[in-house]
Amino acid sequence: MNQASIVAKAALNAWSIQVDRTGKFLDSLTDEQLEREIAPGKNRGIYLIGHLIAVHDVFPEILGLGKKNHPEYQVIFLQTPDKGIQDIPTTKELRQNWKSVHERLQLAFEKMPAEDWLKRHESMTDEDFAKEPARNKLSVLLNRTSHLAYHFGQLRLLK
Amino acid sequence: MNQASIVAKAALNAWSIQVDRTGKFLDSLTDEQLEREIAPGKNRGIYLIGHLIAVHDVFPEILGLGKKNHPEYQVIFLQTPDKGIQDIPTTKELRQNWKSVHERLQLAFEKMPAEDWLKRHESMTDEDFAKEPARNKLSVLLNRTSHLAYHFGQLRLLK
């Protein structure tokens, strides 16, 4: 294994650990548990799952791997606070989209050459990237992993 | 910058983001807020901060950079559940140790050659590492970052 492959493997492993743990935990929750607030007055479980789907659905765009599948989720789960939502998708829909958004990413990551993780991502200009080469696709993956872990820690309080 | 330096910078940046955010949030909490449970019946803020200090205090040992400074924290915050603790360190002590444990890591990481992140860590045998080179020091850093983000997500509920 070359250096880039070892790095990509370590980073994708850290990502998959969080995706798998959150997915398994989601499967273990009843719909009623998922609809509860994580703590009194805080976000509901369904809101956090929708929020994570919305963030991960736009991930392929940042990596240059294709468009998002659920543009309506951007408005509901990224631009609206939980308490402001009129119509939230059903738990059934959210559970399905959790699976499909991560299956898509998994397939895309498997096809991606390890060296590509060190390349510029789509939210950076060539000029900025020349100055800050550590703000690459890998850094997006690492920060998405932290973001997922952050909300998984909150979701765990539903049980 | 060579490949190893770029990778180390991206990974250390992801780590520092979580350390800095958690540290600032901790500074913004009163002692009374820190002593509250993150949700009814769940761990207290002080327990989670002590738990993070205990895990990060042993981090230099795993990287081969020196012994832990607070062995007593291993018993209190890693082997005892919050509800089983008789004498918990004061908020003042925890706030001080939060700072010192991360200052020590920061200095150690600054001195560490970027290539070292791809080397074997102290909990792996040479034999296992030959089979799984992605289970290197970098992977420990990535998993510690996720672990910190997980508990930071919970601590945020104290406000």
Image (cartoon, coloured by chain):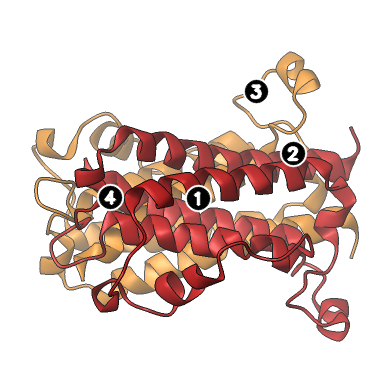
Chain colours: A orange, B red
The residue wearing badge 2 is: B9
Q: Distance between the residues labelled 3 and 4?
A: 27 Å
Front: mark 2 or 4: 2
Q: Distance between the residues labelled 1 and 4?
A: 32 Å
Q: How far apart are marks 2 and 4 (CA)?
A: 30 Å
**Residue in the image at 68% along x and 42% along y:** B106
Q: In which quarter of the image is residue A61?
A: top right
Residue B16, image x, y percentages? 59, 40
Question: Which sits in the foreground, A139 or A116?
Answer: A139
The residue wearing badge 1 is: B97
Question: Which sits in the foreground, A126 or B103?
Answer: B103
The residue wearing badge 4 is: A48
**Amino acid type assigned to the residue bearing label 1 in the image:** Asn
**Residue in the image at 75% along x and 14% along y:** A127
The residue wearing badge 3 is: A124
Instruction: Tell which circle, 2 or 1, labels the residue nearer the N-terminal end.
Output: 2
**Residue in the image at 37% along x and 46% along y:** B92
Q: Are marks 3 and 1 on the same chain?
A: no
* SS for callout 2: helix
Structural crowding at the residue carrying mark 1, measured as other residues with C-alpha within 10 Å and reported as few (<14), some (14–19) or many (≥20):
some
